[in-house]
Image (cartoon, helix red, strand yellow):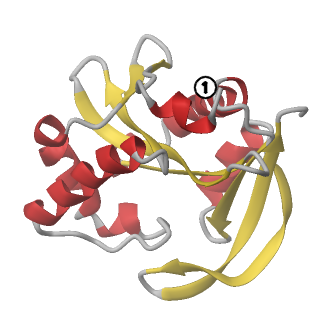
Amino acid sequence: MAFKDYFIKFQELEINKDYILRQVKPENDLEAYYNIYSDVDVMKYYEGGTVITDKKRVKIVLNNQVKEFEKARIYSWTIIDKKTDVAIGRILLSDFEYNNKVANLGYFIGKKYWGKGIVSAIISPVVIFGFKSLALERIYARVAVENIASWKALEKNGFTREGLLRHSFYLPDGLCDCYIYSRLCTD
């Protein structure tokens, strides 16, 4: 099966009784994503994470997520709180290297949901999906050195810190150092 064939139908992922990962619904999820994208604290460590305070721009970002899936460039899930049916964040696989069977993992979550173990819970199903459904060999993540909670979530999910990349991660405050983590399908 060709890699692009995996992008024909979006695959939702059941996490647990509280959370599900599904494709973004730009109209339904606009308000929740606006609250996330406009929060300086949430976007502080998201690479290229410019704070967006214009709902029209947020809607463009959400529509682009759907288009990028259709072009087999990004597999982006919206994290949904099942009790409220509200989007609380995003997790994605991107920067696919098809020949090398490699992808980048990225994520963010609304501040209200920090410290509850949600990111740790959603990483594993996405990684398993990447290895089993997309036939990836390696999934990596780059995390700002200062973003301790994020790199702890990766370590909790079996990712190995491979090293430090100096001035390779662009944040709103400028370039910073980041750790590179990876997990192999054989780990």
Amino acid bearing label 1: Pro
**Nearest the eye: 27 or 89:** 27
Q: Is residue 181 above or below residue 10?
A: below
Camera sees residue 117:
no
Q: Position of residue 33 (x, y in %)?
A: 23, 49
Q: 10 Å neighbourhood of mark 1: few (<14), some, or many (≥20)?
A: some
Residue at 69%, 49% in the rendered image: 98
Q: Position of residue 101 (x, y in %)?
A: 75, 45
Q: Relative to residue 142, is residue 60 drawn left or right?
A: left
Q: Relative to residue 150, is residue 138 drawn left or right?
A: right
Residue at 16%, 54% in the rendered image: 59
| Residue wearing tag 1 | 125
Identify the image quadrant of the C terminus: top right
Residue at 63%, 33% in the rendered image: 2
Q: Position of residue 23 (x, y in %)?
A: 34, 32
Identify the image quadrant of the N terminus: top right
Q: Position of residue 151 (x, y in %)?
A: 68, 54
Q: Is residue 11 above or below residue 24?
A: above
Q: Relative to residue 154, is residue 170 drawn left or right?
A: left
